[in-house]
Image (cartoon, grey):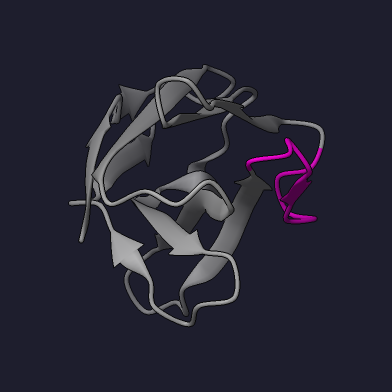
Amino acid sequence: QVQLVESGGGLVQPGGSLRLSCAASGSISSDNIMGWYRQAPGNQRELVAAINNGDTSSTADSVKGRFTISKDNAKNTVYLQMNSLKPEDTATYLCFFRTWGSSRYYWGQGSQVTVSS
């Protein structure tokens, strides 16, 4: 079992920044992928960014150049730095963990990000 604890969501004005954190604990394999999906009401869940333990990362085209994902392997913690936020970034952000080669996802509790003036 893997437990994920998220922090860092909130309300921010357009153009502002937020940083999300997600700390993993439990039975953590060395080969894993962590990242975030987001889901807004009425929208499909979207993969925002992901990073593996080798620091290879990817971000969705919708956030490229604005969001950066990073990882502290020693702390089993992944971060999502979100800059130049737009109202359309408003969503619940869900941290995930997956062992490489497994189809099982573990999920965080979700972090609400609201971008509004």
Of 109 and 114, the residue lying toward us: 109
Figure label count? 0
Q: Quadrant of residue 114?
A: top left
Query: Residue 102's spot in the image, x, y percent?
Result: 50, 78
Asked if residue 72 is positioned above or below residue 49 in the image, the reply reads above
Quick check: 18 above or below 114?
above
Residue 67 is situated, as x and y percent measured from the top left of the image, at: 66, 33
Task: Report if residue 54 lies within the magenta region.
Answer: yes
Magenta part of the protein: which range? 53-64
Q: Residue at x 52, y 17 (%)?
A: 16
In the rendered image, residue 31 lying in the magenta stretch gets the answer no
Q: Position of residue 41 (x, y in %)?
A: 32, 71
Q: Is residue 24 left or right of residue 69?
A: left
Q: Nearer the viewer, residue 90 or 100?
A: 100
Residue 79 visible at all: yes
Left or right: residue 49 compared with residue 59: left
Which residue is located at x 73 percent, y 35 percent? Answer: 55
Quarter holding the C terminus is top left
Quarter of the image with the N terminus is bottom left
The answer to whether 67 appears left or right of 47 in the picture is: right
Q: Main secondary structure of the magenta part?
A: loop
Q: Residue at x 41, y 47 (%)?
A: 90
Residue at (62% x, 51% y) in the render = 50
- Residue 117 seen from this side: no
